[in-house]
Image (cartoon, rainbow, N blue to C red):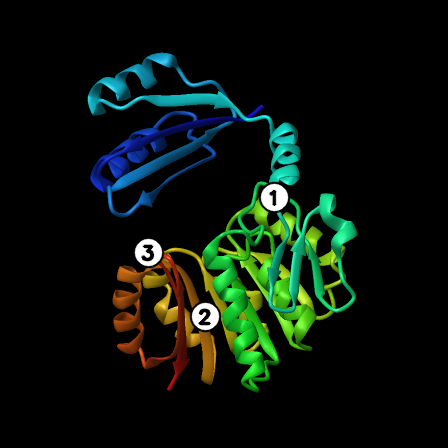
Amino acid sequence: MHFRFSGLVSSKNDAQQICKLLENLNPKPLGCGFTEIDLSNKIWEIDAYFNYVIDPSIIFLLEKLYSVKFFFNEIRYNDWIAKVERKLTPIHLKKVFIHGTHHKKEVSLNKINIEIQAAMAFGTGHHSTTQLCISVYLDLIKKGYVFNNILDVGCGTGILSIVASKISKARITSLDNDKIAVETAKFNLIKNKATRKSKVFRSEGLKNIHLIKLSKFDLIFANILFKPLKTMVKSLHKFLIKGGLVILSGISLQQAIKIEAIYFGHNLKKVYCINEDNWMTLVMKKI
């Protein structure tokens, strides 16, 4: 059995403090984090996952301290996944068609068909950041770019790796720090027959020893978040060949300005960008 602790707060500082308190529990949560879900109203969502029921007095104390209503619920994986699968609509993105099991009948011989199920890993293709990454990649291919060695950092379900594998003959390496994501990506690569020259590793950032053996990359996908993109800049630069590209996504328009400046300071210049709503995807080139 697994349980989710969640709640909304109005400041990043409160979110950080609450997560720190939860991480000091014994036993520790399986995972804990926070995300800004509403930039204009400054609303942060806290999520923590447990494999045991925490003491209700802890929740009561946190609610009193921060004047916030928190929720603690059992996660019913199968029910949740089945429900989401039924509701997820297929994605038509240029020549790519992404679908779940419920929409198999809609596949087309004129499309690159990719089957992705809802799972406990990020990346069904419905989020703007993922679609922006795919659009950028397709635009680069259309412009005549040829990639031979591609890295997907924070691969989630492996959707970007699968798209790249279906369109090019490149060797694909996928990384994620989450065990479930790694297993999900492996499953999806096999299901979509995209395992040729494809490898999936669990890694904290770009610290996996296998990366050294795989040489440098001419394209890196990094569809993650502002903070890890900021801290990874040196590693991403290190693993790019000269003239290689990195696709940075998972950032807002405001964050993109900061990220561009940080990466420019490490000899990476912007060569392309695309945005949707408040999300921005950047393509930076190693110079």
Residue 58, picture quadrant: top left
Q: Secondary structure beneath disc 1?
A: loop
Left or right, 229 with respect to 96, comes to left
Left or right, 273 with respect to 170, comes to left
Q: How many marks?
A: 3
* Mark 2 or 3: the one toward you: 2
Alpha carbon separation for disc pair 1 and 3: 29 Å
* Mark 2 or 1: the one toward you: 1
Q: Is residue 191 visible?
A: yes
Residue at (58% x, 23% y) in the render: 1
Name the residue tied to disc 3.
227
Q: Amino acid at mark 1?
A: Leu
Alpha carbon separation for disc pair 2 and 3: 16 Å
Q: Is residue 282 visible?
A: no
Residue 239 versus residue 225 in the image, above or below: below
Residue 159, image x and y in percent?
60, 58
Q: Amino acid at mark 3?
A: Lys
Residue at (75% x, 54% y) in the render: 106
Left or right, 15 with respect to 202, comes to left
Please rate how many residues cluster around mark 1, counting C-alpha atoms within 10 Å: few if below 14, some from 14 to 19, many from 20: some
In the rendered image, which quarter contains the C terminus?
bottom left
Task: Compare residues 214 and 92 and report the one nearer the observer.
Answer: 92
Q: Amino acid at mark 2?
A: Ile
The disc, 2 or 3, on the residue closer to the chain's N-terminal end is: 3
Please rate how many residues cluster around mark 2, counting C-alpha atoms within 10 Å: few if below 14, some from 14 to 19, many from 20: many
What numbered label is drawn on residue 247?
2
Residue 146, image x and y in percent?
59, 84
Left or right, 74 with respect to 23, comes to right
Name the residue tied to disc 1.
88
Residue at (30% x, 15% y) in the render: 60
